[in-house]
Image: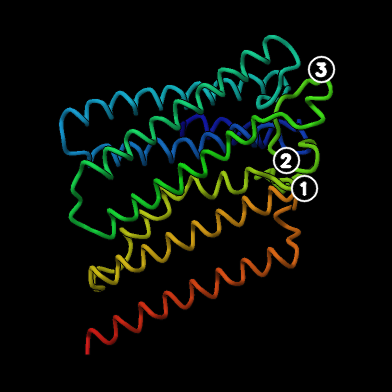
Amino acid sequence: MCLWAVVCLVGLILDPRTFAGDPIWAKPLKFSISLALYAITLAWMLSMVQRPVLRRIGWWAGTIGAAASLLEIVVISIQVVRGVGSHFNVSTPTNQLFYQLMAGGVTLMYCATLVIGAFLAMFSRIEDRALAWSLRLGLIIALVGLSVGFLMVIPTAAQLADPTSSTYGSHSVGGDDATGGIFFLGWNTAHGDLRVSHFIGMHALQVLPILAITLPRALSEADRLRIVVAAGATYAAVTAIALWQALRGQSVIHPDAITVAAVGVTIVLAAMSFMTIAAQGRHQHR
């Protein structure tokens, strides 16, 4: 994945082609980086599964998930070389086959994450409670974020009304996927985009454990745990707001007053939580 990310980066620099307003090599580059992070995370999680039987099952789940990730990248890259879309493209039998392969791959990756995460959360003892809860919360939020992908495969009303439609499903809400997006990320700047919450949610599995690992050891275990739980709740709220905003057909860069208020409340509650944790920590050290 990492090597292919380098290839995609070269393609991004040298290939002037665009698709739906974005550099055509941006998509495989993003997926290569994201899936590489996921593979590393799942391998690390699997190393903490203690029961030999569960570790073997987890190894097979991880292997299948890795193969599915590789299939995803291969299909996306083939479609880039061909100069056509990969997701939602049903314009020809070949494109339909590729799309179905990708859908199957995503489902396998979801299942691999669920299996390894469940084994770790339910059947393995992790001495560091902050790390344990970061993995549990990260897993739950990540599975929710991954589940947003299943919303994208639902055909729009316009697609259902047109039997000759060349696309089936959409990541945009209230508009067309062809609308220009934020550079590199590609997120729709004119309409709602489900990819925002999908991206934020799925990477909770990296963000929260990294937070737990990097918290100063000088803090008490209780304080580290409280910080992780507060951060997890805040992260979940941000993911939920991003999904709610997209489902209302609203671009991530053009929030209305309600969305701004929701973000503001989340920031205030998060700040209050962290200040309370800090105050409790100071009180305990007196």
Question: Distance from label 2 to label 3 (Cα)?
Answer: 20 Å
Residue hosting label 3? 163
Residue position for label 1: 191
- For this view, does 100 lie left or right of residue 276? right
Name the residue located 64 percent from the left edge and 34 percent from the top edge: 152
Going by the numbered disc 3, the residue's amino acid type is Pro
Q: In this view, does 83 lie above or below 191?
A: above
Residue with the most extreme bottom position: 286
Evaluate if marks 2 and 3 touch, with contact meaning CB atoms under 8 Å apart: no
Residue 3 locus on image (x, y percent): 47, 31
Residue 172 circle label: 2
Q: How many marks?
A: 3
Q: What element carries label 1?
A: loop
Q: What residue type is labelled 2?
A: Ser
Task: Describe the element under mark 2 as helix, strand or loop.
Answer: strand
Q: Which of 213 and 274 is in front in this view?
A: 274
